[in-house]
Amino acid sequence: MPFIEPSKYIALSSNLYRPTRFFFKINGLPEKLGVGSVRDFQTEIFFSTESVFFPSRNIASEPYKVAGPVDEIPYESTYSGDLDVTMRVSANFKERDFMEQWMNLVVSQTTQELQYPDSYRCNAEIEAYTLEEDFSPYSVRLTDVWPKGIGRVTVGQGLTDAIATMQVQLAFRRYYIVGSPNDPGEDNMNREATLGPRPEFDPIEAPQNPLTAGFIARGEEVFRSGPRRVRTDANNFSGGPIDTLDDI
């Protein structure tokens, strides 16, 4: 084993990340809850966040055997279950109140009705910061974040010098490394730009056909007020009037 000078080890150790410098924020939640100042809300949430983690990512695979040792065939990305956040509780329990209100956006505690996903899903960011410089060398952006559970707040006679905390479980769909080619950016964090169509939530709209029974029943006025086109060949039309059904 080659000899390495102690100064080299010291330089390497000083370059290690200290996990005490981080920033956690939930984008879009203040607007959904109707709070006054977005900046104050994010500051309070960050101060209350005692611990959080950068989520893990895996690639799911299936065994495939033809001859010899079994091979693994990857087929999709998977992410670590829930984002567990440990939060301090203020004297007025405002952090718990925020989370309770957010959960009510998912399922109403009064009517037990499930709400539309766009009304409660948000995006979140976790940023790591160095001790020497005030910039983030690594941060992730989580999509479709919503509160899955709020843990208990323990109280007791012997907890005079303790600070009350609670566990919050946040579900999310995926994450992007901020600044990477795959990162859609905060301005483009919508379903169409990042995740494509969501048929499980978005109703399919039937294409409008001008030659429906409703239009035809209204007579030739529909065609007189529509685009003015004339036939140029068997299948195409271009500028000119369409006065009657016989012109089509």
Image (cartoon, rainbow, N blue to C red):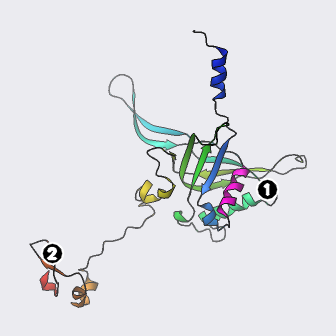
Dot placed on the residue nearer the N-terminal end, 1 or 2: 1
The residue sitting at 68% across, 41% down in the picture is 21
Residue that carries the numbered disc 2 in the rendered image: 237
Q: Magenta: predominant secondary structure element?
A: helix
Residue at the spot 63% in from the left edge and 19% down from the top edge: 8
The tag on residue 105 is: none
Alpha carbon separation for disc pair 1 and 2: 69 Å
| Lateral position of residue 14 relative to residue 215, left or right | right
Secondary structure under tag 1 reads loop
Assess whether mark 2 and mark 1 are in contact (beta carbons under 8 angstroms).
Answer: no
| Residue furthest front as drawn | 133
Label 2 amino acid?
Answer: Phe
Residue under pointer 1: 90
Q: Amino acid at mark 1?
A: Ser
Residue 31 position (above or below residue 129)? below
Residue extent of the magenta highlight: 37-49
Q: Position of residue 123 (x, y in %)?
A: 56, 55
Q: Residues within 10 Å of mark 1 (few under 14, many from 20)?
A: some
Residue 206 or residue 121, whichever sits in front: 121
Q: Quadrant of the N terminus?
A: top right
Q: Position of residue 36 (x, y in %)?
A: 68, 67
